[in-house]
Amino acid sequence: MTARVQTYGKGHGIAPDDLAHCRAVIRTGSLSFHTASRVLPAAVRDPALALYAFCRLSDDEVDEGGNKAQAVLDLSDRLDRVYAGAPRDTPEDRAFAAIVARYHMPRPLPEALLEGLAWDAEERRYETLSDLYAYSARVASAVGAMMCVLMDVRDAHALARACDLGVAMQLTNIARDVGEDARAGRIYLPLSWLREAGIAPEDFLARPEASPEVRAMIARLLSEARKLYIRSEAGVPRLPHRARTGIYAARFIYAGIGAELRRQGYDSITRRARTTKLQKLGWLGKSAGYATASALMPQPATLFAPPLPEVAFLVEAVAERGKVGPSWGIGRTGALLQTLADLKAQDSVAGQQSHRA
C-alpha cells in the first residue's frame, strides 16, 4: 500500500485506477464541479478530482452516517495516516496521499476542513454572519486554498480571492438547501437573523415555511455571496492561464444556482434550485471569454483587498512568508483537538447509553 503512494516522478503520482474511481465519484456526486473541471488542464484537473473525491467522501460520511462523532474521529485517523505516508487502502485515501506528497499540501488546510466537519457533527449553529463565514472558510475556502496549491499558486492576494470564492459558493449552497436542511434538523441561517425576524429556530425546524421573512434571509445570503463572487474574479488572472476557464466556470455555475433561486422568489423550502446542462454550457462559453480577456486586463484594485478575517488563517498557511502557517499552531490546532476530544467524549457517552439499553 505504502509503495503505491511513494512511486512519484513526473505528474501527480495518482494510480490510474484510483483516479478513475475519483472521477466517477465526482461525476455522480458533484455535477457542478464535474462540469467546471472538464475545462481545466489535465495537470490540474486530475489532482483536483482526487482532492474533491476525498472531500466529498469525508462530507458524506459525516453528513449521512449514523454516528457523526465517530465519523469525524475516523476521518482524523485517516488524515493522520495520509500524512504519515500510509493511507488506508481505499482509492480516495491513496489518491489524496499522492497529492499531499506530490504538492507538499500544508496540513492546516485539510485540518480546517476536518474542523468544519466536526462542527457539523456537533450540529453547531451560527449566531452571526461572521460565524457562518468561519464555518464556510473551513468546509469550502480550505478546498479553494488546496486548489491553489495544486496550481502551484502561493500568492497571498490570489489565495484571499480563492477563499472569497469558497465562502460565496458555500453561502449559495446554504441558501439553496434551507428547506432540505431544516427537514433534516439542521439550520445554518444566522440565529441573529431569525431573532430579528421573530422566528424561533425550533419552530422553524418543526415547520419550515417559505415566509416573506425566510425568503428575505435567503435573499440576504445571496447578496453577500454575490459581493464575494465579484471580488473573487480579481484573483483568477493570478492563476495559470490554462486553468482560468475552469475556475471562472465554477464561479458562474455556482452563482447560477443563486440566480435560479432569485427566479423562484427565494423559495428554497418547497423547491430546489437546479440548473440545466444548456445553462452550464453557456457559462462555460462565458468563462472561456473571461479567461481570454483576463490576459489583457489591468489588475483590479479588488485584487489587493485584505482577506476576510475568517479566512486569513488559510492564506497564512499557504502564502510564501518564510514559514508555513505561523498562526495555526498557536490556537487553531488546539481548537481542533479540543473539538475532537469533545466528540470522542460524546461518542463514548452515547456508546455507554446504548450498551445499557
Image (spheres, rainbow, N blue to C red):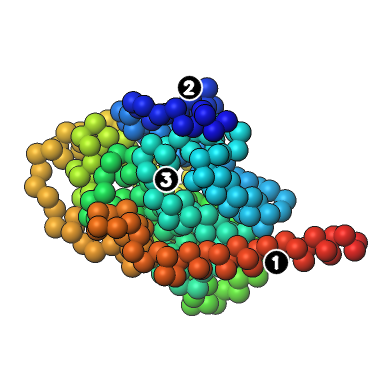
Q: Looking at numbered disc 3 in the image, what kind of residue is underneath it?
A: Ile
Q: Tell which circle, 1 or 2, labels the residue nearer the N-terminal end.
A: 2
Q: Tell which circle, 2 or 3, labels the residue nearer the N-terminal end.
A: 2
Q: Quadrant of the N terminus?
A: top right
Q: Looking at numbered disc 2 in the image, what kind of residue is underneath it?
A: Pro
Cα distance between the residues tagged 2 and 3? 33 Å
Which element type, helix, strand or loop, lies under badge 2? helix
Pair 2/3: label in front: 2
Which residue is under mark 2? Answer: 16
Q: Is residue 302 above or below residue 30?
A: below
Q: Is residue 250 at all visible to an observer of this figure? A: no
Q: Position of residue 330 (x, y in %)?
A: 41, 70
Q: Give the quadrant of residue 209.
A: bottom right
Q: Give the quadrant of residue 28.
A: top right
Which residue is under mark 3? Answer: 257
Pair 3/1: label in front: 1
Which element type, helix, strand or loop, lies under badge 1? helix
Q: Residue furthest top?
A: 16
Which of the labelled discs sits on residue 345, or is there none? 1
Near mark 3 (Cα within 10 A), the count class, few <14, some 14-19 or many ≥20, is: many
Q: Looking at numbered disc 1 in the image, what kind of residue is underneath it?
A: Ala
